[in-house]
Structure formats: C-alpha cells, structure tokens
Amino acid sequence: MTRIRLGYGHVVPGQALPFDILNTRGKILLSHGYVLQDQEQIDRLVEREVYFELIDEEAIVSHYVERVSLYQRVIDISRDYEALLDTQGNPPDFHAIPGIAKRLQEVCELDSDPALACILLHKPSRYSLRHGFNAAILTEILLKQMGRSLDERCYAMAGALTMDIAMLALQDTLYEQSEPLTPEQKRDLVLHPSTAAAMLRQQGVQQPIWLDVVEHHHEMIDGSGYAKRLDASRLSLEAQVVSLAERYCAAVSERSFRPGRSPGAAARQLLTHQGNTIDTALAALFLREVCIYPPGCVVSLLNGEVAVVVKRTLHPATPVVRSIRAPSGVRHQRPPKRLTSKPAYGIQEVLGFDYVRGLDLASLWPRERLDEDDDEDAEEELLEG
C-alpha cells in the first residue's frame, strides 16, 4: 500500500471518509467512515501533515464528490478581470488586481483542476486578457506546491495579471499577425516590462514581488532573456515561475492562423528546446502538475468516445474524464464520468478544441453532488473489466 499525504480534494465536508487518517507514525487519528464537519477541520488536517493509505486509487476516485461548479466560478472571475482591464482607454484601477488573485486562490484551494482546465478551454474575445489570467492560474498552482505563502503567491499572481498591461493592443495585433515583427513592434516588446512597472508605480503600487514579476517575467536563468539579461543569481523564484507559466500558456493557445500545441507537445518543447532557461526542480514540478493530459485536454478514448479530462490522478497517464460524445458521434446530454485506467476507456489521442465548441463546459464540473444515476455509472465502471 502507498501512503499519501492528505490534500485538498481528497476529502469533502459532510462526506464520510473513505479511508483512515494517519499521523506521521502511522497511528490512526480518524477512522474510515468519520464525517468531517467543515472546511476548517480539513484545513487543520492538511496543515498538520496527515496521511492515508491508498489501497485502490479508483475506489478513492469513486468516493470523490463533485462540489459547486468551480469552473463557472473561474469564468466569472475571468470576466471581472477582463472588465477591469478593458476600460476603453481609461486607466484601470490596478489596486483591484490582488482581489482578483485572491478569488482565484479560493477556487484553487477547493480544487485546482477546473481552474487549470480554463487554460485550455476558456476562449474570451481578447487573447491579451486571456494570457495573463491563464498564467496567473498556473503560477498559483506551482508556487503553492513550492511552499510559498498565500500572500507571496497572491502578489506573484498580481504580477502575471498585469505583466502585459503596456502591450495589450500589440498582443491582440500579434494574435492576427503571421508576418515577422516590425522594428517598432520589437522595441515595444522589449520595453513593455519596464513600461508596465512604471504604470503600476504611477498608481502607487509598491509591493516588491508584484513589481519584480512584472519587470522580470521575460528574463531567463541562463541570461538569454530580456530586457536586462539577468541570470539565475538575480532572478526571484516568483519571476521564474511566471516566466514558465506564460510561455506554456502561450504555447497551448491558438493564433488566428494556427492551432495551439497540445499540452504534451508544449511541455516537451519547453523542456527540450528551452531546458537551459528553466530550473531543473521547477521543470520537474511543472511536469508533475501539468502532466501528460491536464484538465481541459480533449481526448479520444479506445471505445470510440470523445472526452474531456476533468481530474488528475496519481498516475499522469490515467486521469478521470467525462465523455461528451458517444462512439456514434451523438453528444451526451449528461457527460458520464470515465476512469481511463480501465482498458475500455484508455486514452487514444489528444484532439482539438473544436470538439467542445458550443458545449456547456461547466457541465463537466457539475454544480451539485453526483446524483444516484451518476453514482451508479461510476460503480459500473469500477466493476467492468
């Protein structure tokens, strides 16, 4: 049996424990079947560093109870962020940015999978606003795993959310542009980190992590970045994480003239062609969190269904998915859950975004608990094969 540290998402308030909770010495603290009363109790357990023994990973997955539609909550935050920055030429109120970051942190604290899915699935009208928002999500997930405090993560996210405020119009132009950059565009690109930091300072922003991320998010640890060509000795961890996050988010995003790369291809390209620009420990963490098939990835299954990854598991190659299209091509009205560790539901290949165009994506992370029919579907999956 494998001993796993308890984390958010393993247990839910009001739901009976599907396993014993153990301390670091293996002593049982809470027995199987105990009902955790509230989120505060879960917080204390996670902070205390407790464990459970994994007897059957699929049984643990089957006990997972869906909460509110956190995906929709992230979309609502995204829209508020877009409204904050898209001010038709008037200066945005940058002091509201940490509030956006904190709301994203609250969602990720409950379950980071639907938030991570937004990077691949949410397509607002302006690429320039999507890019910083997506990078902020990945920044929160990576920095939390690296042990950064809530405030440190919040201001690093604020940096990601405002890193491109001096070139929003240019980003939207480049989204449509397949030709090489003009000299003027190259100049604006190189200057935008310092210009953005100056815009923030003009409104009285003085938070060091926030400004550091904005000024240095294009610097690389090997000194090949811009605009100051700083190396690892002069780059903060927060700036390095945002740099990696924004490059990955750019790689998986489409342009008007080409599709985005698949998550696996984007990760391979970053870690092979740009490996010298990424700290090895950060690269390993990035691979573990983004994994082969991250949430939001559209895939075909061996049984002929089309599905969307909704939850990571301990094994990166076998996530939990929801089927959106039957082998006949008919769309499911209520996307059933599939465990890709089952032979019939193994992942065959990664597909493009067009397969989910027009789909109610929030339905993949239901608002209510699984009803009896969905519970029966999950039980049947466990019994098959």
Image (tube, grey):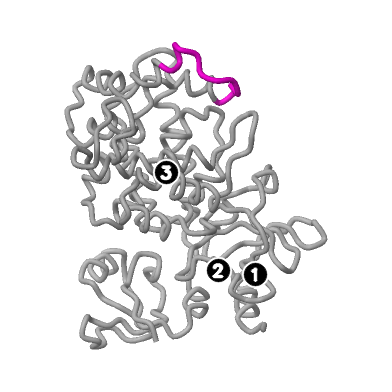
Location of residue 6 with respect to 175 vertically, above or below: below
Viewer-nearest of discs 3 and 2? 3
Which residue lies under the disc numbered 3? 274
In this view, the residue in front, 210 or 251, is 251
Secondary element at tag 2 = loop
Marked residue nearer the N-terminal end (1 or 2):
2
Residue drawn at point x = 22 percent, y = 66 percent: 47
Q: Report whether residue 127 is seen.
A: yes
Residue 322 falls in image quadrant: bottom right
Residue drawn at point x = 33 percent, y = 32 percent: 225
Q: Residues within 10 Å of mark 2 (few under 14, many from 20)?
A: many
Secondary element at tag 3 = loop
In this view, the residue in front, 217 or 34, is 217
Q: Are marks 1 and 2 in contact (CB under 8 Å)?
A: yes
The quadrant of the image that shows the N terminus is bottom left
Disc number for residue 9? none
Q: CA distance from mark 1 to mark 3?
A: 31 Å
Residue 72 place in picture, x, y as percent: 50, 47
Which residue lies under the disc numbered 2? 318
Q: Report whether residue 217 is seen.
A: no
Q: Residues within 10 Å of mark 1 (few under 14, many from 20)?
A: some
In this view, the residue in front, 82 or 281, is 281
In this view, the residue farthest toward the right is 328
Residue drawn at point x = 43 percent, y = 39 percent: 247
Which residue lies under the disc numbered 1? 346
Marked residue nearer the N-terminal end (1 or 3):
3
Residue drawn at point x = 68 percent, y = 42 percent: 358
Residue 207 drawn in magenta: no
Q: Are marks 3 and 2 in contact (CB under 8 Å)?
A: no
Residue 320 place in picture, x, y as percent: 55, 66
